[in-house]
């Protein structure tokens, strides 16, 4: 992505608005130019992107937990290797994204601390539990499927480092959704007990996955400016509809029932889903999802218990540096 | 309803391959337990990579053991349907992760051995084992590199990291002797050029270990009493818990395909 | 909960022999050895590389985008540096 050091020359200037520069900036965006870390950008653009990219990074890292819950219990060696590789990829994606966010001037430590202290959010979907092996299939199929819908347009986002990170992420994630679908398919073709497990997972994940696309368009607070800045190219509802339309035939292929008896197909072929329970979404965002506390506690524990390791690495690096300077002085 | 354990006809070669397969699976499983909880995200990546290498080795070895046995066992039956007394891994590898120092020390002691072991096994008269060795040797070499770098940083880092690393070395040392043990069933394979005599690796292993431990400003324990039993299914208490988790799905849903 | 910042490194990877090292991203590590290993684990999981460079981010000096005009525009008018500037009759063939 780029270097954090490159941005430091801006100092506090980076928050100063300037109408002429803002107009020139918007003209560049309108001409489909990419914005790079050193370029002048409005403070609000920087802030919006820092928020969005870091939340995206937190989601990848917190997202390791629900699936990581099944690595040690994966039912075959092939599944175990694939799941470990997949969860590891998510960590890698978190790292690419933190690096992209850092080019905007905040350090990774600051960004991570904001998540650990609860100031910065991650995707609400990861506050739901993985209760059975079928949940691993459902996450791959639905959660990764929804994520890809969101992420593909971000590959053309106006901010260069974010777009480049997303290109890499999308390339690597292409196996994730297939992996999940394959798990679901195996269950759907398995014993009655396995089929029931698959259906139950779909029942529990369906609505939370639809909520992943964010509030309905008329209620979304960030959409207008994000669209103007070409950070966002499709609205929440557009992406949600695209996802539903893609998923309905897949569920049908699996022989599973989407838990929305009121769903109908309109004359244009779109599947019209029922009203989403936004109260639940708000509660989960407010910290009242089934796993919010567990997820944060697990990340805090890893961070706190890892402190002595990070300190050791830093201390050793400092010692070696001072030995080297001492030698050079001789 | 739970799935019963399988029986395995442990001819010397089947037993030999199973022992190495169990080593790889148990250590790979331990490393996978870290995923999402490592001291830094970069290390999450590193431990998962090592775990994936080991899982890959385990799968090839189980597949080969099943083939040599020639019954209807396969990699998953061998991994998921043998009980604790049928597992043949080194005691060292089933020891719990503990803190990062303990995990890296376990990795270091084993990688310093497996690097030499797989390199020597590339000359095995058994062409399948020689091929597995050629792939595993490169993986082990990297595991040794990575764990050695951490031994040095933890040992020569802060007072706390030094204390933790020394404790891990002291606690795990007694499990290192088992790597060099040979029983009658292996003696025949060694004589036939299929297996190598691990005793021949001991001097070089000790030299590598001593060099890194010294650079890490740590000390090797004077106590030379060594634990053994893993190779004949007499384990520490930890393996049973590991297996109850690892095998839970296969045991709960007999005969299902996943 | 302030954590000391660990140094940032830029990662460059040669994907195939014959190609130049290309910037692929950045990472955090306490020293160069750990940075190289982390680069291997983070950026070459799918066989993307044959060679890795890691460079402390602080060692990079970058041009200032606000000086883009002065830095790069003067080159744009030197069209005679490009082969298409010169007319060679078609019958002469490839040149």
Image: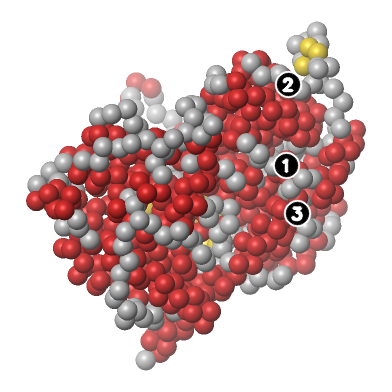
Kindly identify which numbered label has been placed on residue A128: 1
- What chain does badge 3 belong to? A
Of the image marks 3 and 2, the number of the one nearer the N terminus: 2
Q: Quadrant of residue B156?
A: bottom left
Residue marked by disc 3:
A293
Q: Is residue B2 left or right of residue B88?
A: right
Of the image marks 3 and 1, the number of the one nearer the N terminus: 1
Q: Is residue B98 visible?
A: yes
Of the image marks 1 and 2, the number of the one nearer the N terminus: 1
Q: What element carries label 2?
A: loop
In the image, farthest residue toward the bottom: A330
Q: Is mark 1 on a helix, strand or loop?
A: loop
Mark 3–mark 1 distance (CA, rounded to whole Å):
11 Å
User: At which x and y percent is residue A171?
Assistant: 54, 36
Q: In this view, does C89 lie to the left or right of A302?
A: left
Residue marked by disc 2:
A258
Whether labels 3 and 1 belong to a single chain: the reply is: yes
Q: Residues within 10 Å of mark 1 (few under 14, many from 20)?
A: some
Q: What element carries label 3?
A: helix
Give above or below for A273 relative to B106: above
């Amino acid at each position: 992505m780029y270097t954090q050091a490159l941005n430091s020359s801006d100092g506090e200037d980076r928050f100063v608005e300037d109408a002429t520069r803002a107009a020139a900036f918007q003209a560049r965006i309108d001409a489909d130019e990419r914005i790079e870390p050193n370029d002048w950008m409005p403070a609000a653009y920087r802030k919006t992107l820092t928020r969005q990219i870091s939340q995206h990074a937190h989601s990848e890292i917190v997202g390791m937990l629900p699936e990581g819950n099944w690595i040690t219990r994966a039912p075959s060696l092939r599944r175990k290797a694939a799941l470990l590789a997949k969860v590891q990829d998510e960590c890698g994606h978190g790292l690419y994204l933190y690096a992209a966010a850092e080019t905007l001037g905040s350090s990774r430590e600051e960004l991570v601390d904001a998540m650990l202290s609860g100031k910065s959010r991650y995707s609400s979907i990861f506050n739901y539990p993985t209760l059975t092996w079928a949940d691993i299939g459902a996450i791959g199929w639905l959660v990764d499927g929804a994520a890809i819908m969101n992420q593909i347009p971000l590959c053309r986002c106006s901010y260069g480092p974010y777009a480049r990170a997303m290109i890499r992420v999308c390339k690597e994630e292409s196996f994730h959704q297939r992996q999940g679908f394959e798990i679901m398919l195996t269950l759907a073709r398995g014993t009655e007990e396995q089929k029931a497990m698959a259906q139950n997972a779909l029942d529990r994940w369906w609505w939370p996955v639809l909520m992943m696309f964010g509030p309905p368009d008329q209620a979304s607070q960030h959409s207008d400016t994000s669209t103007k800045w070409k950070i966002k190219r499709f609205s929440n509802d557009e992406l949600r509809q695209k996802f539903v339309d893609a998923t309905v035939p897949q569920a049908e292929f699996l022989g599973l029932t989407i838990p929305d008896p009121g769903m109908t197909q309109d004359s244009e072929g779109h599947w019209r889903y029922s009203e989403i329970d936004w109260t639940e979404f708000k509660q989960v965002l407010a910290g009242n999802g089934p796993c919010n506390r567990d997820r944060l506690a697990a990340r805090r524990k890893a961070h706190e218990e890892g402190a002595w390791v990070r300190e050791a690495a830093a201390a050793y690096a400092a010692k070696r540096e001072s030995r080297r300077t001492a030698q050079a002085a001789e | 309803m739970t799935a019963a354990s399988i029986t395995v006809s442990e001819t010397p070669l089947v037993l030999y391959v199973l022992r190495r397969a169990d080593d790889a699976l148990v250590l790979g499983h331990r490393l996978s337990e870290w995923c999402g909880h490592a001291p830094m995200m970069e290390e999450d990546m590193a431990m998962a990579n090592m775990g994936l290498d080991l899982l890959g080795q385990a799968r090839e070895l189980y597949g080969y053991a099943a083939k040599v046995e020639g019954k209807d066992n396969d990699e998953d039956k061998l991994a998921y349907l043998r009980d604790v007394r049928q597992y043949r891994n080194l005691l060292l590898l089933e020891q719990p992760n503990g803190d990062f120092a303990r995990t890296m020390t376990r990795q270091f002691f084993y990688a310093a051995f497996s690097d030499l072991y797989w390199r020597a096994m590339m000359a095995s008269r058994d062409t399948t084992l020689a091929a597995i060795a050629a792939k595993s040797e490169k993986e082990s070499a990297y595991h040794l590199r990575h764990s050695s770098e951490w031994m040095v940083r933890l040992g020569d880092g802060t007072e706390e990291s030094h204390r933790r690393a020394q404790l891990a070395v002291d606690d795990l040392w007694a499990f290192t002797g088992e790597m060099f043990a040979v029983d009658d069933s292996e003696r025949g394979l060694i004589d036939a050029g299929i297996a190598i005599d691990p005793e021949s690796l001991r001097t070089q292993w000790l030299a590598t270990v001593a060099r890194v431990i010294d650079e890490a400003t740590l000390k090797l324990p004077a106590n030379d009493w060594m634990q053994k039993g893993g190779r004949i299914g007499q384990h520490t208490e930890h393996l049973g818990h590991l297996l109850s988790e690892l095998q839970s799905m296969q045991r709960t849903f007999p005969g299902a395909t996943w | 909960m302030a954590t000391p910042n660990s140094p940032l490194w830029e990662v460059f990877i040669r994907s195939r022999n014959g190609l130049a090292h290309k910037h692929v991203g950045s990472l955090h590590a306490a020293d160069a050895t750990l940075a190289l290993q982390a680069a291997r684990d983070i950026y070459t999981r799918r066989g993307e590389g044959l060679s890795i460079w890691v460079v402390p981010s602080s060692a990079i000096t970058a041009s200032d985008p606000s000086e883009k005009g002065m830095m790069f525009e003067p080159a744009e008018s030197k069209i005679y540096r490009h082969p298409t500037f010169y007319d060679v009759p078609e019958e002469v063939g490839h040149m």
